[in-house]
Image: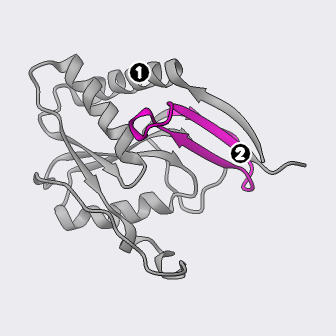
Amino acid sequence: MQKKTIFDGQKIQITIKRLCRQLIENHDDFAKTVLIGIQPRGIFLADRIQSELQSILKNKKILKGNLDITFFRDDFRRKDGLVTASSNSIDFIIEGKKVILIDDVLWTGRTIRAAMDALLAYGRPEKVELLVLIDRRFSRHLPIEPNYIGLQVDSLDSQHVKVSWADEGAEDKVILLSEKQ
């Protein structure tokens, strides 16, 4: 496997700050907007976004939840063995609110489709937007596009994009993995 670092430490932090400024531009004080991190990997980015927004908006409460999509995926029955779901933690109503779904990598769009299905169990949002750290834009299976993008990566289907976070005990880094040719 060949590894190429495409994004790391300081660049990731600068990108998160930029994404937060874009969110504030569109959602003002977040009075009617909530953040939802998609389990398992989107929650790390959602935590960072919430923390940065809190530091910018000082006295405003930024609501954030975590959404598990395991049983909403169209491929969960295809996996060998038992499938284990993570817990949801959305302790607020999304009815009539603007929801920003957050994930680390957008590839085929299937995860986002599953998240939108799972989200409906919590009410009918006024609007749903998508924020991703990495957009693999030429690999969609479904017509889903992000509203907020950290970095667009042009990659082959045979390549894999891996995001690691300091919150998991690694370092903040995005790596493009390729088979040796």
Q: Which mark is residue 177?
A: 2
Mark 2 and mark 1: Cα distance apart in space: 26 Å
Please name whichever residue, 165 or 33, is drawn nearer the observer in this view of the structure.
165
Give me the residue at 42% from left, 41% from top: 168
Q: Position of residue 159 (x, y in %)?
A: 72, 50
* Left or right side of 99 for 181: right
Asked whether residue 25 is drawn in magenta, I would say no
Q: Position of residue 177 (x, y in %)?
A: 71, 45
Which label's residue is closer to the chain start, 2 or 1? Answer: 1
Contact between labelled residues 1 and 2, with CB atoms less than 8 Å apart = no
Q: Position of residue 89 (x, y in %)?
A: 20, 55
Q: Is residue 137 visible?
A: no
Q: Position of residue 99 (x, y in %)?
A: 25, 47
Asked whether residue 161 is drawn in magenta, I would say yes
Give me the residue at 32% from left, 63% from top: 86
Q: Which mark is residue 149?
A: none
**Quick check: 47 above or below 79?**
above
Please name whichever residue, 95 or 2, is drawn nearer the observer in this view of the structure.
2
Give me the residue at 59% from left, 45% from top: 162
Q: How is the image coloured?
A: one colour
* Left or right side of 103 for 34: left
Boundaries of the magenta span? 150-176
- Dot 2 lies on which element? strand
Q: Amino acid at mark 2?
A: Leu
